[in-house]
Amino acid sequence: MTNAVHVGNRWIIGSRPRTLPAAVVPVLVGAACASGLDNTVWWRAALALIVSLALQVGVNYANDYSDGIRGTDDVRVGPVRLVASGLAPAKAVKQAAFSAFGVAAVAGLVLAATTSWWLIAVGAAALLAAWFYTGGPKPYGYLGLGELFVFVFFGLVATIGTTFGVAQQITALSIVMGCAVGALACALLVINNLRDIPTDRAVGKKTLAVRLGDQRTRVLYVALIASAFVCSLASAVAWRPFAALAVLAIALAVAPVRRVVRGAAGRDLIAVLGETGKLQLAFGVLSAVGLILSR
């Protein structure tokens, strides 16, 4: 019965729905940063959301494909992967990745046509970064640079890009809040890689967690969570006071931080991954509400 369920829902499983808040939050926060600015066109936020979601799904399928054909997912502690588990052929997963990237490209082209053609260059960079994270002969995700990609594209670019798409302005507020969003997105990846240190090390996948080691990776996770709240407070002091509402999300940070500090490992970190996702979503919603109330 379990196998039948997995097969029937394999494409949903492969898209990794629990990672989608990482795509929604920057658009939500970026749009909120645009509130109160002149010449806002709100329907363009929907295009930004399509781009962000499609990129996230595409990255997930691309990682599944690339890791699967390399054999680095043959022994996993985390959620099931399509290629490694045999739930879907590698070619089909690759096609799914490119289909998602295609959706992102089309929505991005429409957004560029209604704002600035410079967004095409940004979008092309995002697509290349998405594929070569684990794809190509020398994937940068295997060199410890995955967190940098996540911070830049699912933090700064997605947040600032949404603000620009809605209001055609790049503001200091969107940059600082993009850093906050990027920090939480990185925290998700750090937990994922912390969980996989033993298996990644065994197959020569030198993620940042493998390079730092167990203890320093745990310190990094806590620092990323803390930095997100520092950014929200800085935004409250400098621009929009109610941005401080995001601090209420600290209540959701207590459990995952405690688990990490106390040495949770292996399957126990799957729960931390879910809790961090909920924290990220709550932070995004509270930040958006606060930013809008302060406009």
Image (cartoon, grey):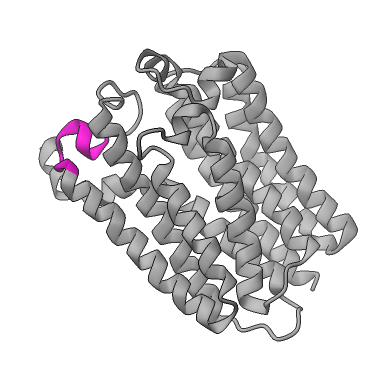
x, y percent for residue 13: 27, 45
In magenta stretch: residue 140: no
* Residues rendered magenta in the picture: 81-90
Residue at 35% across, 17% down: 203
Q: Is residue 271 visible?
A: no
> In what quadrant of the picture does the C terminus appear?
bottom right
Observer-nearest residue: 67 or 292? 67
How many discs appear?
0
In magenta stretch: residue 85: yes
x, y percent for residue 162: 60, 68
Observer-nearest residue: 86 or 202? 202
Left or right placement of residue 150 versus residue 8 in this view: right
From this view, report whether residue 100 is shown above or below residue 185. below
Residue at 66% across, 62% down: 160
Residue at 14% across, 44% down: 7
Outermost residue to the right: 237
From this view, report whether residue 234 is shown above or below residue 265. below
